[in-house]
Each structure stands twice: as structure tokens, then as C-alpha cells.
Amino acid sequence: MTIAARLQALGIELPPLAIPAAAYLPFVQTGSLVFISGHIAKKDGKAWVGQLGLTMTTEEGKAAARSIAIDLMGTLKAAAGGDLERVKRIVKVMSLVNSTPTFTEQHLVTNGCSELLGEIFGDAGKHARSAFGVAQIPMGACVEIELIAELAA
């Protein structure tokens, strides 16, 4: 099954490439690696605001991370010249979770992104990963995730 077919089967439509709101690029490619800038969780077109362990549950955070995976794939599609079949491997995911000092389930929140990447890319979606708890994320967003992928020529 193609990547496009997997996305369609899940009812996922990838967004177009978003224009950065600050002084950075949405992605940079060097050699076969593409580095996708951090994407914050959005809900109804705005920052998905919240703090895990205070105003949000782990399951809500996981849903936010899943939504970020969709946005990341939209950017990755643009980086791959419109063809996600060029993705050889998702190499690394780094997740920042806006959380209280006592919240310890950042890894479970980040699974929302990792699991969807695995569903879409299969074995090529299995990646190295880091998940951190942080005191705050821009615009009060609950989660921010960045990604590194390898592209075929």
C-alpha cells in the first residue's frame, strides 16, 4: 500500500507548507537528510494551549502530538518535492512537552506522533526519539515536535 493510500485510508489530508512566523526556514536539506523545524500543536487553526499535568491529560497530549505528526508530514511532503514515497526513513523525532515539574509521561504524549509515523511509513517510520518536559513552549502550546528524515534521490 502506498503512503498516499495509507493517509487516505485514515482520512488524513496533509496541510500545505506553512510559512514560518519568525526568522527560520520550515525545513533544511543537507545531502539526503531533511531537518524539519519544530511544529507546535494546533487546534482550530490556533495554538493548542495547555500544560500536561495541569490543564491537559496524557491522552489529550497524545492527540496533540498526533496532530503535529500530520503537520510534520505536510512539511516533509513539501521537502520531498511533493512525493512522500521519497522518504527512505524517519530518522529522529524530538518532542517538547509543556508540562508541570511532576508530570512524567512525556514519552506517552510523544507516542501520538511516533505511532502515526509508524502507521504511515511502516518500518521506515521507526525512528530514534527524545521526549522532554519543558516549562513553556511558544504561544503556550502544549507540545512542539521536530523531525529528521532521510530522502531518496
Image (tube, helix red, strand yellow):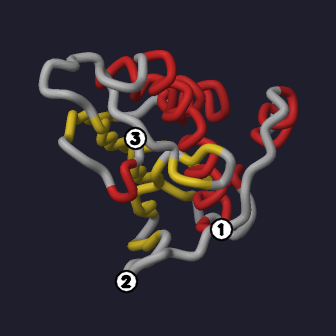
Determine the residue positioned at 48% across, 29% down.
114
Determine the residue positioned at 31% across, 23% down.
54
- Identify the mark nearer the N-term, 1 or 2: 1
Q: Which residue is mark 3?
A: 143
Depth order, front residue of 52/10: 52
Badge 1: few (under 14), some or many (20 or more) residues near its Cα, within 10 Å?
some
Q: Position of residue 141 (x, y in %)?
A: 41, 47
Q: Which residue is mark 1?
A: 17
Badge 2: few (under 14), some or many (20 or more) residues near its Cα, within 10 Å?
few
**Splitting the image into 4 quarters, where does residue 86 fall?**
bottom right
Which residue is outermost to the left?
101
How many discs mark residues in the rendered view?
3
Determine the residue positioned at 42% across, 17% down.
57
Q: Where's the C terminus, which quadrant?
A: bottom right
Observer-side mark, 1 or 2, equals 2
- Identify the mark nearer the N-term, 2 or 3: 2
Determine the residue positioned at 13% across, 27% down.
101
Q: Secondary structure at mark 2?
A: loop
Observer-side mark, 1 or 3, equals 3
Q: Secondary structure at mark 1?
A: loop
In the rendered image of this protein, does residue 123 appear above or below residue 20? above
Badge number at residue 23: 2
In the rendered image of this protein, does residue 142 appear above or below residue 39? above
Q: Position of residue 50 (x, y in %)?
A: 40, 36
The residues bearing labels 2 and 3 have C-alpha atoms spaced at a distance of: 20 Å
